Amino acid sequence: MFLDAGDLSPEATYRLMSGIVVPRPIAWITTVSEDGVVNLAPFSCFTFVSNKPPMLGVNIGRKAGKRKDTGANIHAMGEFVVNIGDASQMVAIHESSAEHAPDVSETELLGLDTLPCNTVRVPRLADAPVSMECKLERVIAFGQTGAEFIVGEVTAFHLRDGLLHDGKVDTRALNPVCRIGGPNYATLGEIVTLRGMQQTAKTVMDGGRGG
């Protein structure tokens, strides 16, 4: 089958690519509006982009040409929290993707408790196994639909007790959820361990902030 990308609508392209680029980790993002409303939404176009300083990147699109509440809040406040949910929270993650007016708090609607953070004004999810406090580092616009790749510098990590061993997260204990195409999610399934590879040490570049 051959598809000419130029002939596809934005919706058709999204359906196609979201089924190809899989599985995707989910950034369950809390933000706060200028009016103090806590917003919560999941985003699966998500990765990390730097390790010194630690930075995360998430692509946030628009609805009918307007920024989603998460994007608008990050632009206004310059802060957000990336929470990582586990398999027990799969339904809540999915339900938090429903569209609501900006004055509706998804954390309140779903009965999810929050806790204050240490370095940002945005709260984190109390029951999330991992939360990362972020301050906006830069916004890069892409494409014709107003999508923005938002990069945040992680200023603090919160990890559930027992997840960290020798500096590494026990992924089995984390039990994260990933997004497939459409309203479909998956868990880790079988984990295959291969031989470790020799790695050159990561260093800070002279005079730079490279990752």
Image (cartoon, grey):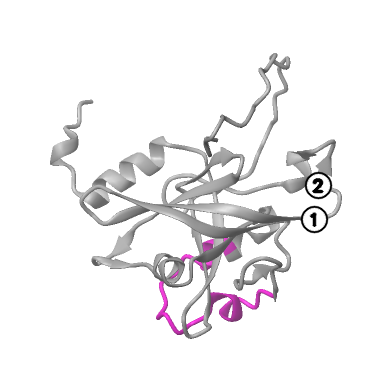
Seen at 40% across and 40% down, the residue is 19
Q: Residue at x 59, y 75 (%)?
A: 107
The disc at residue 163 is: 2
Residue 53: x and y in percent read 60, 44
Tell me the residue that label 1 is attached to. Answer: 160
Q: Amino acid at mark 2?
A: Leu
Secondary-structure class at tag 1: loop
The front one of 198 and 114 is 198
Q: Which stretch appears magenta?
A: 93-113
* Mark 1 closeness class: few <14, some 14–19, many ≥20 residues within 10 Å: some
Reply yes or no: does residue 171 show up in magenta: no
Give the label on residue 197, or none: none
Which of the image's four quarters has the N terminus? top left
Residue type pointed to by label 1: Arg
Furthest-left residue in this view: 7
Please give the name of the residue rendered at 43% of the width and 46% of the height, measured from the top-left corner: 181
83 on left or right of 149: right
How many residues crowd mark 2 within 10 Å: few (<14), some (14–19), many (20+)?
some
Q: Secondary structure at mark 2?
A: loop
- The image position of residue 32, as x and y in percent, is 52, 75
Q: Please state the horizontal and vertical placement of residue 39, each as a whole percent of the image.
A: 52, 73
Label 1–label 2 contact, CB within 8 A:
yes
Q: Quadrant of residue 148?
A: bottom left
